[in-house]
Amino acid sequence: MKIEFETDINGYQEARKFKLLVDSIIKYEELDQSLKSLASSLQFQLQEFLSNPEFADFKDGGSDELFAGSHEQTEPAAVVKLFRDLIGPSKREIELSKQRQTLIERAERAEISAFEALAETAEIGRERDQLRARLKQLESGTD
């Protein structure tokens, strides 16, 4: 994966924020080997971009303190969510999603079965009432 930023103050700030995001994910999240490799690659690319001599003036402007302050206030869960939005769900999340879908399908089948049983019970109740009425009619006719 190759990331490119503008070579101006906006690009520098975006790269700086993205590097803080990647650093946070590496620090706070347990990643499998492929994600760890991707995050390390991104971290290296970002560091290479940020170490460009063109940005020496931006570093002296105190922007690092601004980023550090905002980085400390960032909750790891929000950072992880953002990273997952960028790279997609993990294998565990995909498996849990499949299990959830299977359970939903089972619940729907159970609901259908329950309604069918309820309809059958109502039908049997009607037949019973008809047979009682017929029985009464036959009993009253034989007396």
Image (cartoon, grey):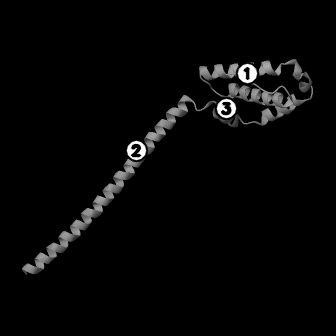
State which quarter of the image contains the N terminus: top right
In this rendering, the answer to whether 3 lies above or below 97 is: above
* Residue 68 % position (x, y): 82, 30
User: What residue is drawn where x is 19% and y is 71%?
Assistant: 132
Relative placement, left or right, of 7 versus 89 is: right
Residue 57, quarter of the rendered image = top right
Circle number at residue 106:
2
* Residue 141 % position (x, y): 9, 80
Element carrying mark 3: helix
Element carrying mark 2: helix
Of residue 17 and residue 140, the one placed in the foreground of this image is 17
10 Å neighbourhood of mark 1: few (<14), some, or many (≥20)? Answer: some
Residue 44, quarter of the rendered image = top right
User: What residue is drawn where x is 21% and y is 67%?
Assistant: 128
Query: Could you give the CA–CA distance between mark 3 and mark 1, rounded to whole angstroms?
Result: 13 Å
Of residue 11 and residue 106, the one placed in the foreground of this image is 11
Query: Could you give the CA–CA distance between mark 3 and mark 2, rounded to whole angstroms?
Result: 33 Å
The residue wearing badge 3 is 83
Q: Amino acid at mark 3?
A: Phe
In terms of sequence position, does the residue under pointer 3 or pointer 2 come before the other? 3
In terms of sequence position, does the residue under pointer 3 or pointer 1 come before the other? 1
Circle number at residue 79:
none
Q: Amino acid at mark 1?
A: Gln
Relative placement, left or right, of 110 versus 43 is: left
State which quarter of the image contains the C terminus: bottom left
In this rendering, the answer to whether 129 lies above or below 91 is: below
The residue wearing badge 1 is 43
Q: Amino acid at mark 2?
A: Arg
Image marks 3 and 2: residues in contact by CB distance under 8 Å: no
- In the current view of this chain or complex, which residue is farthest to the left? 142
